[in-house]
Amino acid sequence: MSTYKAPLADMRFALFDVLDAETQFQRMGFADASRDVLDAVLEEGARFTETVLAPLNRVGDEIGCSYDKASGAVTTPPGFKQAYAQYVEGGWAGLVSPTEFGGQGLPHAAGVPLKEMIDAANLAWGNFPLLSHGATEALLHHGEAWQQEVFLKPLVEGRWTGTMCLTEPHCGTDLGLLKTRAEPQDDGSYAVTGTKIFITAGEHDFTDNIVHLVLARLPDAPAGSKGISLFLVPKVRVARDGTLGGANAVRCGALEHKMGIHGSATCVMNFDGAQGYLIGQPHKGLMAMFTMMNTARLAVGLQGLGLSDRALQNGLNYARERLQMRALSGAKFPDKPADPIIVHPDVRRMLLTCKALVEGGRVMGYHGALLVDVAHHASDAAERERADALVGFMTPIVKACLTEWGVECTYHALQCYGGHGYIAEHGMEQLARDARITTLYEGTTGIQALDLLGRKVMQQQGAGLRAMLEDIETFCAANAGNAAVAEFIGPLREQAAQWQQLTMKIGQRAVADADEVGAAAYDYLMYSGYVALAYWWARSVAAAEASAQTQAFKDGKRETARFYYARILPRTLAHAQAIAAPLSTLTALDADAFDA
Amino acid sequence: MSTYKAPLADMRFALFDVLDAETQFQRMGFADASRDVLDAVLEEGARFTETVLAPLNRVGDEIGCSYDKASGAVTTPPGFKQAYAQYVEGGWAGLVSPTEFGGQGLPHAAGVPLKEMIDAANLAWGNFPLLSHGATEALLHHGEAWQQEVFLKPLVEGRWTGTMCLTEPHCGTDLGLLKTRAEPQDDGSYAVTGTKIFITAGEHDFTDNIVHLVLARLPDAPAGSKGISLFLVPKVRVARDGTLGGANAVRCGALEHKMGIHGSATCVMNFDGAQGYLIGQPHKGLMAMFTMMNTARLAVGLQGLGLSDRALQNGLNYARERLQMRALSGAKFPDKPADPIIVHPDVRRMLLTCKALVEGGRVMGYHGALLVDVAHHASDAAERERADALVGFMTPIVKACLTEWGVECTYHALQCYGGHGYIAEHGMEQLARDARITTLYEGTTGIQALDLLGRKVMQQQGAGLRAMLEDIETFCAANAGNAAVAEFIGPLREQAAQWQQLTMKIGQRAVADADEVGAAAYDYLMYSGYVALAYWWARSVAAAEASAQTQAFKDGKRETARFYYARILPRTLAHAQAIAAPLSTLTALDADAFDA
């Protein structure tokens, strides 16, 4: 059985020692976000996720959600609903929402360790409250006053949940193709008709109402992605004065049978002239949706991180207990029938890979969240703008890398178990199956790569990359005389310089053929992730040394950084070479010549 | 729904054009293994696997095997038993077994494309006949005359199946720890008592009897791996004259719940004084088992290959049909609402990665099988010895790389589907789950790596590596003036030279500390696999050019080879750097200092 213990010490280290979040929060005017308050949130969050959510992870997988065709109702796994009630009661739903709508007004980054804990403890369960966040943000940024009044408070309090209805059977990435339509009604509402698929938490038994955010076309909409509007469609009809009406014409038509996250309801949603309200401007729905994209994608990155950490924790426990073979250099525990497998260098390679990707990834992920706060709340406009560019640049990297590493770490940790890892009772294979969704939804890794290179680098002239390179150089310069990180500064500077050069070269090639962007995108993304992680590892070592952490903690950070630089960072060599390959290596073959 | 079409054209190309198998078979005295016969085997194998096995793949996953606690019986998924009857009827069971025991006497390598087809069509089903092969080999090489007489014929005919009972709850890799014991009886048989786990096809409803090969300890056995003997324990008791007795004291105690291969019965087997017969010499059971290891491991490599190919076929079909977005360089199909996703370079990257690993891996896997034949049947002793060293060296590479690539290819192909890949109905997620077992059983990738570097390279003074490097140099020298492969010869020679140097350096470091072997093993294994594949890709291009294949086929091979050299082979850079890292990067941290 897979266990979970919230890694509070490392979470605090990432947040307070490396990122200096407390100072930042205070600077941004979050007076309540003191270290004491945040520590209490972490402690309580750990208690809730370890004791309430984690024990439900397996039953969620085994029993899953069930669908009643007659009523269209979805029943969540045993215990899920009660856990949600505790979540609402504990005030977790509105942790980072504005106080004026019943939230606790903490900064976004203060909610991120909780998010990681929830995902590690029970990813499937975590998908129910997750989507409320998107609906809340959409209403905050684009909702009319009455819409905020009527819909925001129940969402923030967790009495209702939200969804994001984008995908249709024939279109996911390419939303310009979507067909769901919205007809204006005399009362100012819209009748929404169409079929949406892959709707997370589209139907469930947690709450009495569900607020669907739906992308659809108005009758006069231009074709393509410029003709998409955003609508709010509640499960139970709600009048402008907040009065509840009867059931709306929206119904769950089926649940998908998935590889994992069985406890998460992935619904086909049928809208059949359902009453909806326009959110924001006509035909500007995709833009409104995009404003939610950064936080949603960063959130999925945290899912990869949480699963990686849980996998690592269990792999580590198993490797310390499982006795098998002797160390090649001689028995380490001669009194036992065999040595614990953690003595074997190859088992350590797998565990250290996880440790390096988890702890480094944690800083990277939390930093992304902190940038969201800075972009919104810094007093200085230039600082906000810089943070906005940087978070835009880092978001696809965080999303794609933390989820790709989630797949990798759940692979390694399972591998430590040998054949036992393949057996359900240990819980490792569930982590691997659950992790597999994270590189797909909220935009596949390939889509993140195109977003990074095509949009964030090429279209925006690399403002985010420049900011990142400045940060790296600032750190390197400031630590030029710091013996604790001297060994990392040289390689880091070299990688950063190559990052810039690679980017320029791709830019030059893209002038000749736009397909060069697509050809380089994936390898550029992964290259970027590994360099960014090298930066965060060097900063982690510096922060540990400068902190009041124990010597063992400092040693752990330094040795893991050494492992990372020596054994993981060289992956950049392969990615750089792949980027340098001619475009023809991808385009020469005709589509019908792929079969042998 | 995932489909499968046996890739006969490429199978023939690998076997006949690249490996020149027909000539080799004839040289080894397999008079019946003519091109005509082998072509007929391929055609019939394709028909059987495509129409009988492939359609049962999904039901096998969905329904799986079930266990009746009262009787200890295992029921296989609907259709599995009938498919096995067809398999036996078609004479497939004894395809490569000696004619004297009812087999068809074809060479081992002639059965390998069939094996790949079975694995691609229905991996779980394929595990039932697979294990009979191990039992057959054990009896052929180590059985007494009466044992061969009584047990071999029904195994070869497929009337009975076999198992290999090695693992116990506390020991898998480290068989020296095993506890199952065998007490000599007055009639010369043994009473076998103990619990074995992870026994593939340990119980089922295909046949009336099952022949278990069981590792156990005699009462006077020395401790550790030198005190293990091999026993044959039938499910239904069999006297020395072949008379069937009653039920033996062996019973399936449970089925494991696994991540995948649900149609394969993975059994806990309880032996409670079961009647068994000693196979081979007392205390030499592990050696006898090891003689089966090469073919069993090569067979698991083919499982990775088969799944990769099926995943690629489906990913390719989807990528040609799914319309989403326009090519960055401009619409390729302006008359359609969007371009098929195969126009996108990043989708091509994923598909070409699969294609390069599948088609190159096919030649590598088939070559391993051919070496098994040469090692047994070549007329020249030196040639047999060389083939034996080479197959010993290549076996862990083939097993580990083809299965790691199986995990990778099923990942990429699923990724091409986006979110749809995560949904059961497309069948892609089953391929990914099924593939996940292959890097675990028959020795994890880490164990293959230790076998390669520790045993095959260090202990055996690199005879296999030398033979491989000779083969590469022979090819390079012979093709020095061949314009068709000129672009590959230089890089291949360079990689081969580095391979040798890396090996020497590791050897030097291992003198100082044996843990250096474990530290380098995984990266050395993967490095070796990529260089070996570079060799097979260069040979494939040369063979295609020299063949009567179509120009399109030749182009396909050349362009895929270019892709491989430019975009996959650079992974060796990262592996070489990891190998160069100091041992301390893996050993510095105390086992209890891994937690952050």
Image (cartoon, coloured by chain):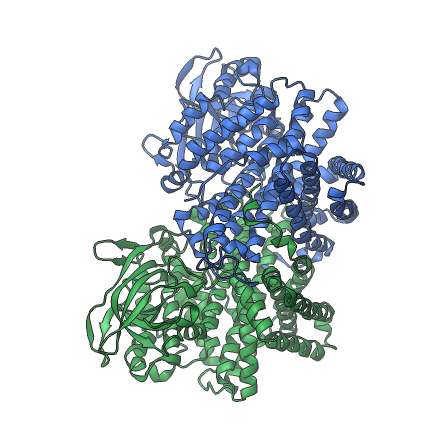
Chain colours: A blue, B green
- Image quarter where the N terminus of chain A lies is top left
In the displayed structure image, the side of residue B398 where residue A28 appears, left or right: right
B352 left or right of B179?
Answer: right
Q: Nearer the viewer, residue B373 or A571?
A: A571
Percent coordinates x, y for residue B386 in the rendering:
57, 81
Task: Say whether residue A516 is left or right of residue A206.
Answer: right
Nearer to me, A273 or A364: A364
Q: Is residue A79 visible?
A: yes
User: Quick check: A349 above or below B144?
Assistant: above
Q: Nearer the viewer, residue B298 or A305?
A: A305
In the picture, the quarter occupied by the C terminus of chain A is bottom right
Please provide percent x and percent y for residue A402. 59, 42
Residue in the image at 44% along x and 21% along y? A89
> Which residue appears farthest toward the left when viewing the image?
B246
Percent of width and height locating residue B595:
55, 43
Relative image position of residue A358 (x, y in whole percent) = 59, 42
Q: Residue furthest front?
A: A335
Question: Residue B44's image quarter?
Answer: bottom left
Q: Nearer the viewer, residue A434 or B55?
A: A434
